[in-house]
Amino acid sequence: MHQLWTFTVPRTGLSAADAARASHVVASLPAPAVVTDIAGLLWLVDVHDPQVAEDVAGALRESRLAVTAGVQTVYDAEDRAAADFIGISGADVDLRLVRDGEVFSPDPPCPRCGYHDAFDVVRNGPLWIDESVLGDTEVANLPNGQLLMTRELTVRLERVPARGLVVEDVLSGRRRISDRFVAVRAEVSVPAPCPVHTTTLGDGYCSLCGAAHGALEGHFWLPRSAVGEVDVVSRHPHKAAMLLMRRSVLDAVGDARGLRRGDPAMVCPD
Ligand SMILES: [Zn+2]
Ligand SMILES: [Zn+2]
């Protein structure tokens, strides 16, 4: 794993002099910095090396342009190969959920940190999907971050077994229970990483909702006492979104169509 620094250099709303200065500064950044032009609106400057990041930060600071900076951990194949858990998601398919707007309604923001995002919704009724848009996809994302999976795949997972995976019927066609698809969630939620082993830059994670208020440095550690014996956990309080699966279990079904691997996580002995 390594850290990736990203600097955002604005290009709009600048005086002619500032615009010229911005072009000059970006053009003279050291070569390892990767500059991407975002539709003529801004430049993203990506740096994978701490020394170069310092040089770039210095050059941009001197320019006195309104540059914003962020840092994140980027994992590589080695980290995934050694991980205890790996984040999973599905294909992005326009599911044309029937009565989508009525199925989900927003939660209040987190009472501790005020955070709110698209996964912070309550479900008011059954999921009613249009299977015809799914083709041969076996795993797809639902709007609340939950995953839609084929029953066949959940049977394979139960055989492994995948402990802690909860399977829910969905409706399709004329409001009948789907033979082919189910929605899955986790029995266990671990919203925030272990505060002892996990290093964050900035304010860290909200222990209630799991929102990141700083950048993660190194591994995301899940406490053993929170994970227990399950093979599937959710990093969201509703236990539906942001699923992680034990790597050994995921390897058994890794060929599922639409299944995507996300960031790794480790289990610490707490
Ligand atoms: Zn919160
Ligand atoms: Zn720990």
Image (cartoon, rainbow, N blue to C red):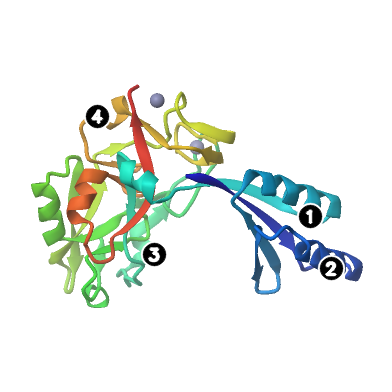
Q: Which residue is mark 2?
A: 19
Q: In this orientation, does residue 237 appear?
A: no
How crowded pointer 3 is (Cα within 10 Å; few <14, some 14-19, many 20+) is rated as few
Residue 92, quarter of picture: bottom left
Give how far apart the Cα atoms at labels 1 and 4 are. Answer: 47 Å
Give how far apart the Cα atoms at labels 3 and 1 are. Answer: 39 Å
N-terminal label among 2 and 1:
2
Cβ of mark 3 under 8 Å from ligand 1: the answer is no
Callout 4, which amino acid?
A: Gly
Question: Which residue corresponds to the image point at 23% horizontal and 57% vertical from the top-left?
Answer: 254
Callout 1, which amino acid?
A: Ala
Question: Which residue corresponds to the image point at 80% horizontal and 68% vertical from the top-left?
Answer: 23
Tell which quarter ligand 2 is in: top left
Question: Which residue corresponds to the image point at 75% horizontal and 54% vertical from the top-left?
Answer: 67
Q: Residue 101's mark?
A: 3
Q: Residue 66's mark?
A: 1
The kind of secondary structure element at disc 3 is: helix
The kind of secondary structure element at disc 1 is: loop
Q: Whole-percent x and y of residue 71?
A: 60, 46
Residue 85, quarter of picture: top left
N-terminal label among 2 and 4:
2
Image quadrant for the C terminus?
top left
N-terminal label among 1 and 4:
1
Question: Which residue corresponds to the image point at 52% horizontal and 41% vertical from the top-left?
Answer: 212
Of tags 3 and 4, the one toward the viewer is 4
Q: In this orientation, does residue 190 appear?
A: yes
Callout 3, which amino acid?
A: Gly
Callout 2, which amino acid?
A: Ala
Give how far apart the Cα atoms at labels 2 and 4 are. Answer: 55 Å
Q: Which residue is mark 4?
A: 228
Give how far apart the Cα atoms at labels 2 and 1 are. Answer: 12 Å
